[in-house]
Image (tube, grey):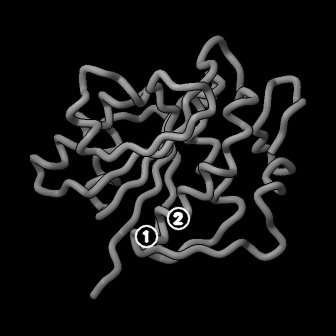
């Protein structure tokens, strides 16, 4: 039996502080790990419906995003797409409407994958800034571990790149901290 195709999709706007969480984490994963052939990592930015093709090519999609759910900033959330689509009026994920709409189109095409959204409650998504706030940055490693576990449960595998560590991402420009550089992971 062929392993299922897994898409790890980081979404968000890296110019709006915590809003860029998904993109930052996908870049961190790409820099630190090698994944099995059935796992694809994609910086989805703010592409919305333009992500329909990669989503319909996958069997299981793991979306990484800032998730507004009224919890304490830094709280980690795991939301299934089924729960998400029932709560369209309540916007948890910053990109929820685009995601629900894209999954609906995928279903119409007969190619809707299973989907889970993993994210962190943001502290600040405005004004401009390219670094995550301290409460969100402090939870990046825990969210990374959750993403890696979700990949494993979906049938994918990963290994740390030789000579790499998640901390080495900082040297490559993937800084997780406030714009003053005081809190880094």
Pick the residue in front: 139 or 161.
139
Quadrant of the rendered structure where residue 165 is?
A: bottom right
Image position of 162 with respect to 147: above or below: below
Residue at which label 2 appears: 149
Whether residue 151 is situated above or below residue 173 in the rendered picture: below
Residue 37 in percent (x, y) is at 48, 76
Secondary structure category for the residue under label 1: helix
Q: Which residue is drawn at 55% across and 40% down?
A: 76
| Residue at the (71%, 20%) spot, across then down | 129
Which one is in front, 157 or 110? 157
Quadrant of the drawing holding the N terminus = bottom left
Tell me the residue that label 1 is attached to: 153
Instruction: Report if the CB atoms under discs 2 and 1 are less than 8 Å apart.
Output: yes
Task: Residue 84: give x, y in percent of width and height.
Answer: 29, 37
Task: Give coordinates of residue 90: x percent, y percent.
Answer: 30, 21
Q: Which of 23 and 185 is in front in this view?
A: 185
Cα distance in 3D space between marks 2 and 1: 6 Å
Relative side of 71 to 33, left or right:
left
Q: For residue 38, what is the image quadrant?
A: bottom left
In the image, taking residue 67 as reference, residue 183 lies left or right, namely right
Residue at x 32% of width, y 37% of height: 99
Residue at the far bottom in the pictured view:
1
């Amino acid at each position: 039996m062929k392993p299922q195709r897994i898409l790890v999709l980081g979404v968000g706007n890296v110019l709006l502080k915590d809003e860029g969480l998904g993109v930052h984490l996908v870049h961190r994963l790409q820099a630190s790990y090698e994944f099995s052939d059935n796992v694809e990592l994609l910086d989805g930015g703010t592409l919305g419906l333009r992500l329909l093709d990669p989503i319909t090519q996958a069997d299981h999609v793991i979306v990484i995003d800032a998730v507004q759910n009224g919890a304490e900033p830094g709280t980690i959330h795991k939301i299934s797409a089924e729960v998400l689509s029932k709560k369209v009026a309540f916007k948890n994920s910053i990109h929820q409407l685009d995601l629900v709409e894209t999954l609906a189109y995928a279903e119409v095409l007969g190619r809707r994958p299973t989907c889970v959204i993993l994210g962190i409650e943001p502290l600040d998504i405005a004004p401009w800034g390219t670094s995550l706030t301290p409460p969100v940055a402090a939870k990046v490693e825990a969210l990374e571990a959750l993403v890696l576990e979700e990949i494993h449960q979906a049938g994918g595998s990963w290994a740390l790149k030789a000579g790499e560590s998640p901390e080495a991402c900082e040297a490559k420009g993937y800084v997780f901290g406030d714009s003053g550089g005081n809190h880094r992971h």
